[in-house]
């Protein structure tokens, strides 16, 4: 499994491209917010000859959806997320105005992500883990073969997601991490929505919230 992270927009959000050896790829949380960032992302996909098959969101906060319309326009892929984040997705254009961002257009969403679903990308499979707390419908994408999890804003290196935004719940977030993430193998690499890479084992030992 190959992947590349891009740090986009004023919120320093991590956008991930994942692809297999046959150049079939997916994108998680496209946050590109201007022409320069869009061009950087598009040039990488073209240079690597990656064919995008999936457009996935860990959750629908504004910083994670800024590039959804770009991905839809360029590749015809509607974003998929868990149903409980639909309100956040629909309210995102209004949030953009609140933050003084350019007018945000969002495409229609694709089929809702199912909690029992396995996202298949060639020979790769990703399990959907329901991890509410940062947002009502937060999910993580876990690949057991390579011990990698793309955690959105649930778990960070040395921290956890904020819960003071609408729909946030601190205790629910702690429960999600302890029950869904800390039960994974300790060598599992955590690729978060912001910041650097960590491991489940490291966070169990050193994260100050536990």
Image: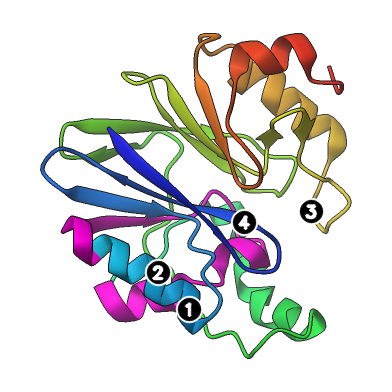
Q: Tell me the CA gap for discs 2 and 1.
A: 6 Å
Q: Residue at x 24, y 32 (%)?
A: 124
Which mark sits nearer the N-terminus, 3 or 4?
4
- Numbered disc in front, either 3 or 1: 1
Is disc 2 placed on a helix, strand or loop? Answer: helix
Residue underneath mark 4: 13
Q: Tell me the CA gap for discs 3 and 1.
A: 32 Å
- The location of residue 207, given as percent across then percent down, is 79, 20
Which mark sits nearer the N-terminus, 2 or 4?
4
The label shown at residue 189 is: none
Residue underneath mark 3: 167
Q: Quadrant of residue 103?
A: bottom right
Which mark sits nearer the N-terminus, 3 or 1?
1
- Numbered disc in front, either 2 or 4: 2
Q: Does the residue at mark 2 contact the one at mark 1 (Cβ under 8 Å)? A: yes
Residue underneath mark 2: 40
- The location of residue 19, given as percent across then percent down, is 25, 44
Is disc 4 placed on a helix, strand or loop? Answer: strand
Crowd rating for badge 1 (residues with CA inside 10 Å; few <14, some 14–19, many 20+): few
Residues in magenta, as a range? 46-75
Q: Residue at x 78, y 26 (%)?
A: 174
Residue underneath mark 1: 36
């Amino acid at each position: 499994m190959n992947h590349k992270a891009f740090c986009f927009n004023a919120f320093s959000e991590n956008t991930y491209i994942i692809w297999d050896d046959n150049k079939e790829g997916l994108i998680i949380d496209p946050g590109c917010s201007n022409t320069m960032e869009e061009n950087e992302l598009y040039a990488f996909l073209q240079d690597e000859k990656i064919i995008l098959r999936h457009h996935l969101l860990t959750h629908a906060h504004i910083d994670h959806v800024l590039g959804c319309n770009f991905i839809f326009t360029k590749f015809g892929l509607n974003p998929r997320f868990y149903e409980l984040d639909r309100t956040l997705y629909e309210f995102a254009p209004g949030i953009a105005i609140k933050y003084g961002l350019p007018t945000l257009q969002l495409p229609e969403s694709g089929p809702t992500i199912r909690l029992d679903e396995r996202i298949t990308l060639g020979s790769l499979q990703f399990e959907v883990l329901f991890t509410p707390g940062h947002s009502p419908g937060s999910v993580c994408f876990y690949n057991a073969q390579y011990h990698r999890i793309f955690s959105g804003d649930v778990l960070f290196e040395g921290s956890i997601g904020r819960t003071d935004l609408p729909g946030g719940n601190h205790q629910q977030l702690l429960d999600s991490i302890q029950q869904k993430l800390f039960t994974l193998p300790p060598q599992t690499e955590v690729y978060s929505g912001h910041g650097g890479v960590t491991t489940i084992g490291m966070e169990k030992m050193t994260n100050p919230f536990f």
